[in-house]
Amino acid sequence: ATGKPLLSVRDLQAWYGESHILHGMNFEVRTGEVVTLLGRNGAGKTTTLKSVMGIIGKRTGTIDFDGHDISRASSDKIARRGIAFCPEERGIFASLDVRENLMLPPQVRPGGLSLEQIFELFPNLRERLKSQGTKLSGGEQQMLAIARILRTGARFLMLDEPTEGLAPVIIQQIGHTIARLKKEGFTILLVEQNFRFAATVADRYYVVEHGKIIDGFANSELDANMDKLHTYLGV
Ligand code: ATP
């Protein structure tokens, strides 16, 4: 891994109402890395992304991004710092077509991708430009959801289980897309259950359990950690 931390999370705790979900998360993501959060259902991976994005009821601890403390900032301010979140449920508007979905997010920073740049990354979307959200396959919806956050100008992308429910060939395409984005200089924090997929793109991993990071290792150490990983993930 190269560079200084772009995102640095220290003692992050988070709650949904009375439910205390994150119990002191510590991790960092350096510029240009793809970092993957692994862990069982309910471990707190999604909650971690939501906390960084500022879309959770209550959080404490420190979140530094690009030299700024964003731990008390609102989500729109966090977006303007250059962070984008692609949720697991994708959030495609069914009644809007592909073009309209792409035009929805405001460009909050310079450097947001133009439609042309997006079609270069996602050729399928050009062909589906006039198709309504409902008419898209799961894979197309996922591509659209990733494409849409690139419009904002964010350079730090948080992707929540982008491969969920998709066919192997589509998963492979998403892997290529992530590799391409990394090559273009984006920094990516990924949540994945599928560590075979994660292994194709990740530089490093953290393992989340009961709202804490319990382990972390580089992609080159994946094989050596496989037994432990099977235990952690129960697979
Ligand atoms: P998954 O893959 O199932 O999303 P995860 O590791 O991302 O797993 P989270 O979604 O972060 O886990 O959930 C962590 C815990 O928080 C779970 O126990 C879940 O039931 C709880 N939780 C999630 N969302 C809410 C909510 N909106 N209100 C209350 N509790 C929630």
Image (cartoon, grey):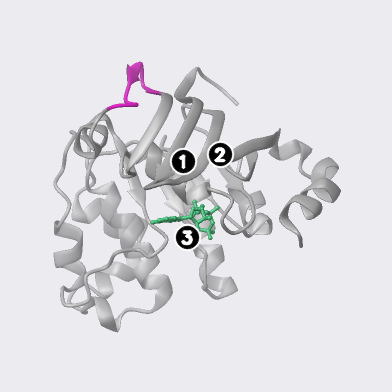
Quarter of the picture containing the N terminus is: top right
> Is any atom of residue 181 visible in this view?
no
- Label 2 SS: strand
Mark 3 is on which residue type? Pro
- The correct choice, above or below, for 108 with respect to 130 in the image is above
| First-in-chain label (3 vs 1) | 3
Query: Quarter of the image holding residue 82?
Result: top left
| First-in-chain label (1 vs 2) | 2
Q: Residue at x 49, y 60 (%)?
A: 174
- The correct choice, above or below, for 175 with respect to 127 in the image is above
Q: Residue at x 79, y 55 (%)?
A: 230
Mark 2 is on which residue type? Val
Q: Residues within 10 Å of mark 1 (few under 14, many from 20)?
A: many
Q: Residue at x 59, y 72 (%)?
A: 168
Mark 1 is on which residue type? Ile
Say left or right for 2 vs 106: right
Q: Which residue is mark 2?
A: 35
Q: Disc 1 beta carbon < 8 A from ligand 1?
A: no
Residue extending furthest front?
A: 18
Distance of mark 3 from mark 2, alpha carbons? 14 Å
**Tag 1 and tag 2, C-beta contact below 8 Å:** yes
- Label 1 SS: strand
The residue stretch that appears in magenta: 63-72
Q: Which residue is mark 1?
A: 188
Residue 63 location (% of width, % of height): 41, 25
Residue 233 location (% of width, % of height): 72, 55
Q: Which residue is mark 3?
A: 162
